[in-house]
Image (cartoon, grey):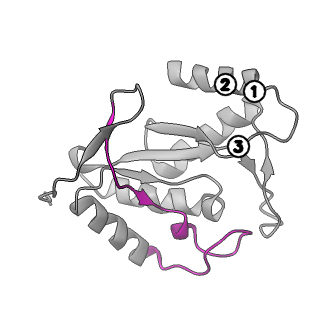
């Protein structure tokens, strides 16, 4: 089904050349409850309906993170992406750097930006989102594990090059 999108103001995202609407869709709440910073139980179908409506209204990017719902928000965004024709899919922004233990979901995630964890998180996010590339990949929080920031940025640069 082709959707007639409304026109929203756009701005260039830094020096990337990507044009994004001035309003995006934040998918934190779509992660649901059952984890340290959850919004409580959420209905996936209601989350998907809200995302679809935002896209219909012209929003061209969705922000999520691996840690939102311990991966669940990315899965819901992935369902949206798979349900839209390629030309109508919004840009996907997600984040890395928060590592959690699924056995203790109510414990705050650790802030880790080691090169190997960045790569592993990126690969897991790609799988959950069902996409071949992430349009904007961000560090969620500064590292607290002692990883030099230069190592973290080098890992991110390698992902961009791929």
x 38%, y 69%: residue: 48
Q: Main secondary structure of the magenta part?
A: loop
Instruction: Examine the structure image and report whether residue 142 is included in the region drawn in magenta.
Output: no
Crowding at dot 1, Cα within 10 Å, few <14 / some 14-19 / many 20+, comes out as: some
Comparing 15 with 127, the one in front is 15
Which residue is identified by label 3?
97
Badges 3 and 2: C-beta atoms under 8 Å apart?
no
Instruction: Examine the structure image and report whether residue 31 is included in the region drawn in magenta.
Output: yes
Which residue is identified by label 1?
149
Secondary structure of the residue carrying numbered label 3:
loop
Comparing 121 with 14, the one in front is 14
**Which residues are drawn in magenta?**
18-44
Q: Earlier in the sequence, mark 3 or mark 2?
A: 3
Measuring from the top left, give residue 162's x and y in whole percent: 51, 21
x 77%, y 67%: residue: 105
Q: Earlier in the sequence, mark 1 or mark 3?
A: 3
Give the quadrant of the N terminus: bottom left
Which residue is identified by label 2?
153
The image shows a total of numbered marks equal to 3
Measuring from the top left, give residue 52's x and y in whole percent: 30, 65
Badges 1 and 3: C-beta atoms under 8 Å apart?
no
**Rendered view: 122 above or below 39:** above
Q: Is residue 131 left or right of residue 54?
A: right
Crowding at dot 2, Cα within 10 Å, few <14 / some 14-19 / many 20+, comes out as: some
């Amino acid at each position: 089904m082709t959707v007639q999108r409304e026109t929203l103001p756009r701005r260039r995202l830094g020096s990337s050349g990507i044009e994004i609407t001035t309003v995006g869709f934040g998918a934190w709440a779509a992660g649901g409850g059952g984890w340290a910073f959850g919004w409580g139980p959420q209905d996936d179908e209601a989350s998907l309906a809200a995302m679809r409506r935002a896209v219909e209204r012209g929003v061209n990017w969705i922000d999520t993170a691996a840690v939102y719902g311990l991966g669940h928000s990315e899965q819901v965004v992935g369902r949206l992406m798979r349900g839209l024709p390629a030309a109508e899919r919004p840009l996907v922004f997600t984040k890395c750097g928060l590592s959690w233990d699924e056995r203790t979901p109510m414990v705050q995630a650790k802030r880790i930006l080691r090169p190997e964890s960045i790569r592993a998180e990126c690969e897991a996010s790609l799988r959950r989102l069902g996409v071949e590339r992430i349009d904007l990949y961000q560090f969620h929080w500064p590292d607290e594990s002692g990883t030099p920031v230069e190592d973290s940025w080098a890992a991110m640069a390698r992902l961009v090059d791929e």
